[in-house]
Image (cartoon, rainbow, N blue to C red):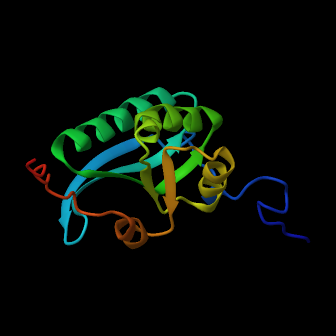
Amino acid sequence: METRSPTDSGQPSPARVRPGGPAPLLLQTVHEYRAGPGAISVLKARGTVDDSNARQFAEALTDHVGQAGQCGEHPLLDLTEVYFACAAAMRSLDRATAPLARAGRALAVVQPRPHVRQALTSAALPGVRVHATLAAALDTLRAPQPARPLPER
């Protein structure tokens, strides 16, 4: 008698199937102070970014970037636990980072999974800079310099 595993029958392994569908999108902001860059604000995303929640993702990211700017923090986006990014997610990311791009700046995106990194690289968004690690992203940031008084004439 021949026995077959679930993958041999053409069906995915139960460990690879998520009964409820895609993982829900969870967003969390963490504020830190680091020697060197100073104050940072990390938006940690977890789950699936798709058509159903791309707008929520864009709004949260826009708020994150805006609030970090108002507080004098460097905004970062941690995509370590994002499982999927669709075209709508890329458009949302582009809209949310457009003000940074217009100002000649970019949002540091940290540790995207390989398929997300590939999508970001292909999209070539002007307001996004991808970093393999948090340490690499922090190395590119500088602490804000205090304003210098203008020389008297």
Question: Looking at the rendering, which quadrant does residue 16 occupy?
Answer: bottom right
Identity of the residue drawn at 63% across and 47% down = 124
The relative height of residue 12 versus residue 20 in the rendered view (above or below) is below
Lateral position of residue 25 relative to residue 51, left or right: left
Count of marks placed on residues: 0
Identity of the residue drawn at 46% across and 40% down = 101
Lateral position of residue 71 relative to residue 37, left or right: left
**27 or 36: nearer the viewer:** 36
Lateral position of residue 12 relative to residue 17, left or right: right
Question: Looking at the rendering, which quadrant does residue 110 occupy?
Answer: bottom left
The relative height of residue 20 versus residue 37 in the rendered view (above or below) is above
Rendered location of residue 63, percent (x, y): 30, 33
> For the view shown, which residue lies furthest in the front direction?
153
**111 or 71: nearer the viewer:** 71
Identity of the residue drawn at 27% across and 48% down = 29
**89 or 35: nearer the viewer:** 35
Residue 133 seen in this snapshot = yes
Residue 50 seen in this snapshot = no
Rendered location of residue 58, percent (x, y): 44, 32
Rendered location of residue 9, percent (x, y): 85, 57
**42 or 38: nearer the viewer:** 38
The relative height of residue 79 versus residue 94 in the rendered view (above or below) is below
> For the view shown, which residue lies furthest in the right direction?
1
Please identify the quadrant where the N terminus is shown.
bottom right
